[in-house]
Image (tube, helix red, strand yellow):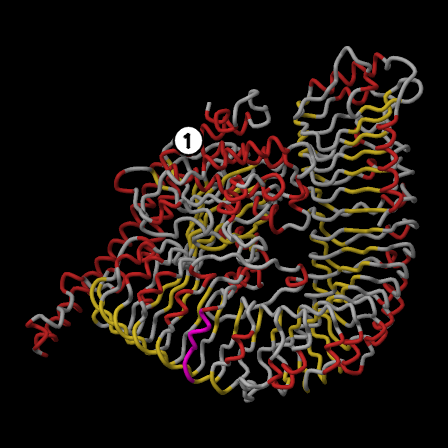
Amino acid sequence: MLLNYVLIHLVAILVVAISTSNGSCNQLDRGSLSSFNLSISATPPLNWSLSADCCTWEGVGCDDSSRVTTLWLPSRGLVGTMSPSVINLTTLSILNLSHNTLSGPLPDGFFTILHQIDLSLNRLSGALTASHNLPNTTTILNLSCNSFHGTIPSSFLDKASKLQAFDVSNNSFSGSLPSFVCSSSPSIQRLDFSDNQFSEQIPPGFGLCSKLQNLRAGFNNFSGQIPNDIYSLSTLQELYLPRNKLSGPINPSIVSLINLKILNLCSNELTGAIPQDIGRLSSLEHLHLHINRLNGTLPTSITSCTSLITLNLRVNSLEGELSSYDFSRLVQLKSVDLGNNLFRGSLPESLFSCRKLTAIRLAANSLTGQILPSIVSLPSLSFLSLSNNSLTNITAAFGILRDCKNLTTLTLSKNFYGETLPSDGDESLVGLDNLRVLALGACGFSGSFPLWLSKLPKLEVIDLSFNFLTGTIPGWVGSFQELFYLDVSNNQLSGNFPIELTTMQRLAFQQSSHQIDSSYLELPVFVTTDNVSSHQYKLYNQLTSLPAALYLGNNSLSGTIPNTIGQLKFIIALDLTGNRFSGEIPDAMSNLTNLERLDLSRNHLSGQIPSSLQNLYFLSFFSVADNNLEGPIPTGGQFDTFPPSSFQGNPELCGHVLQISCSAAAPTNNSPLAKGTRKKKVIVLILVICSSIFTISLLIYCFLDKRWRRMDQKQGLETTSIDIEASTTESLVTLFPDNDNKIDTLSMSEILEATEDFSESNIIGAGGFGLVYKAVLENGTKLAIKRLSGDTCLVEREFKAELEVLSTSLHQNLVSLRGYCFHEGYRLLIYPLMENGSLDYWLHEKPGGAACLSWPARLKIAVGAASGVAYMHEKCIVHRDLKSSNILLDQNLEAHVADFGLARLILPYRTHVTTELVGTLGYIPPEYGQSWVATLRGDVYSFGVVLVELVTGKRPFLVMNPKGERELVKWVMQMRREGKVEEEVFDPAMRERGCEGVMMRVVEIACLCLNQNAMERPTMSQVVDWLKDAERPPPSGSNSRHYIAR
């Protein structure tokens, strides 16, 4: 967008390429460059031979007087610090050291004479001080994607009168936004402050930037309103302020920005109406106002924004008759999302005149009428979501939509209430050959399971839930090659469990899927479920994260559950609740090793719960309530985490979770005691007495355990305890010695104030036991408070075990425990806050985050994390849940391994998992499927997965991988066998940067960690050594394995 900015960089490249000199380079310059070279290392090494003219050195450009004017070394694998000798290059005007791993602060006087500086994508840190003030010669400064912090002082920019581009995005700068840049640099064209920690209101002053084209300050903590003087910037082309806390109405003066092309104010707290004259923004191409609190009608003038490509107003309270608008003038429009508003009336026919549309969402409004025939005039339409309206005539709808040949996603749920699905012989059902997602839930449809679905061969997702369908589930449903999500719950279906469903390709054999066009995922598909919490819902709210699932609950299905159900090895959720299934629970269900949710409640199942279900180590929800089961409830594995409600309504079940001792459990039907009612009553009486004794004993144990624990803490730990103000539940905060001396005392009231009473807005993550909150104390100290939840006695034991480990884990690459406390039934762990979040966030969630993590930065993270794990292993501590979201990054992007909720000392009586979920899908070692023994070698496997993540930039489990294989490890292994690692596996953002050789060696290290035979995996100490040596090429003639294993 900033053409001059790009042209300047191109000229700089040409300068380096063609620079020649009439004689040898200046000796002072040679010495300065040599000193710089001594402070860094490069992979491969720089060809800076002392016998050669320094003007011929790689990346060095000289003028006609043989003085160095340019140093251009982006993506050269530079590691080290910034040498002060650069300042001695008194004629240097262009410096580009971007995409490397330079660290530490900048030397004083660093910017003295430079014109163009690009230090982006490094690991530079520290604050900008008066000694770094820019000279009046600087035109471009790019410090993005580093770890600078502190405020930007006004003196830093006082003399930068020629500055044209200033980019400090993706750092940790704080304080107020430096609007004073406009008074000192009136020629500035591009300002990027996004992804920092700036706060307060956006100050006035930007109106003085009369040539400003791009103003980016999204993903900060700004509040209040946009200052009025910004609206005087007639040259502004981009205003980017998403994910802040801006409030109040959108100022009508915004329409004065007549050259604006991008306006992004999404995810704020804006109120009021969209300015009526917004149509004056005739150059506007992308309008993002979604997820605010806007109300009123959609201005009719918006149809005058004839350059619009993207229009997203989702999740507001906008209203009006959509059919009254003339959208036909928006000839460039490709994506429109007006979902979750209050629009009414019929579908706007004029919208279908926008021939370039590929995605339309009008869901969750109050639209009426029928789908219009003119929609077929959209040749590229791929995504159509009209759910949760009041549309009618489903038969006519399919008759029209069949001619939308490129349609891949069609969601029409909560419409057509009480109608009948089209008959199987209806010719209107011919077509829709490319359809992959079909949602017709909660429409109240009657009739049988539609046969015409069998004519849609590419279906991957089918939702027919909450209707009145009758008859049986036909066997041909199991023949879909790509189907992985089927929801027919809450209907009136009958018959047996279709045996054919147990052979579904995507659930049983993980067959490859077809190539997915990018437009297929242009807008998210939201799935509403009452069965998960709001935080779990976020994990499964888009099509790319839908679980492989069969939802058959709340029907009238009968018969037995077939043993062949054990073939569905890749299923994640299986819901058979509320049916009439009888017989025993198949032991083969233990083969469903990826299962996270299993609901068999409210059926007529009998027999015992198979003990082999303990092997379902991903299982987080389980219910067999209200059946006729008997015998002991399995113990160990996930079964120790399920509440009593999972088993209630089965009078013959016994076990610790029900507080019914199995030693006095009811006998089987073959026992003589079962023949007499009186004897049964005696048994019941005995059970009641035993359970009462057990309950009392349990309460006494919990009381004594709590007292013993407090005594141990007071006597055996060097801690400071502080009583907070008297409350209904007395809370005690215990602090461990703080090496940083930032907090000596802390009260519960301070924690409540710092977290705003554990407000949802302060949630920054979720752990195995609960949520993590950000807390900012009055003195500015930032903490992370992990609030645990669960069964009291069980969690307190795990809590105590975690304290035993964390209080002695002192390593620079581990997250240290600062303290803990008990409050109102919760247990709180207190940690320092890692400002940059997790590695998972940077690789997969943070906008532009993956690009900011250069390969040297990723390798350093790998070395740091490996060092932390190796330290744990030296103390015989198993982490058990290593993953990228448990690798946190501080201000300098240093890695710190977190989450010791599963850590245990490796002792004989503590080697079996008895509580939480062991590991996370995609990171679990294969041997954990056969044994519940967690090992150090298991951690090595999980770390190998993290290495693969760093190399590929992909998640370890891809529900909808375009290449077909959804397990990242298997896919990488396959590409390795086929010799396609560099072209297929490497993260595209890392290619062609001169680091391919190092990345290949890291892939080989990862493969050693991922060995199926646990005993052949290396130790973490070996992994640390190999990673540190990865930048050193292997000896000539040796293969990677021999080099690594030496």
Looking at the image, the residue that sits furthest to the left is 672
Type of amino acid at the residue the image marks with label 1 = Thr
Name the side, left or right, on which 424 lies relative to 160. left
**Residue found 46% across the figure and 43% down from its top:** 882
- Residue ID for mark 1: 1019
Q: Is residue 473 magenta?
A: yes
**Residue found 80% across the figure and 45% down from its top:** 178
Q: Is residue 742 magenta?
A: no
- Indicate the quadrant where residue 781 lies: top right
Q: Position of residue 225 (x, y in %)?
A: 78, 60
**Residue found 37% across the figure and 70% down from its top:** 499
Res. 806 in view: no
Name the side, left or right, on which 432 lies relative to 618. right
Query: Which is more toward the observer, 683 or 417?
Result: 417
Tell me: residue 350, above or below residue 614: below
Q: Position of residue 647 (x, y in %)?
A: 30, 67
- SS category of the residue bearing label 1: loop
Please tell me how crowded label 1 is: few (under 14), some (14-19), or many (20+) other residues with Cα within 10 Å: some
Question: Where are the magenta residues, as a range?
Answer: 471-478
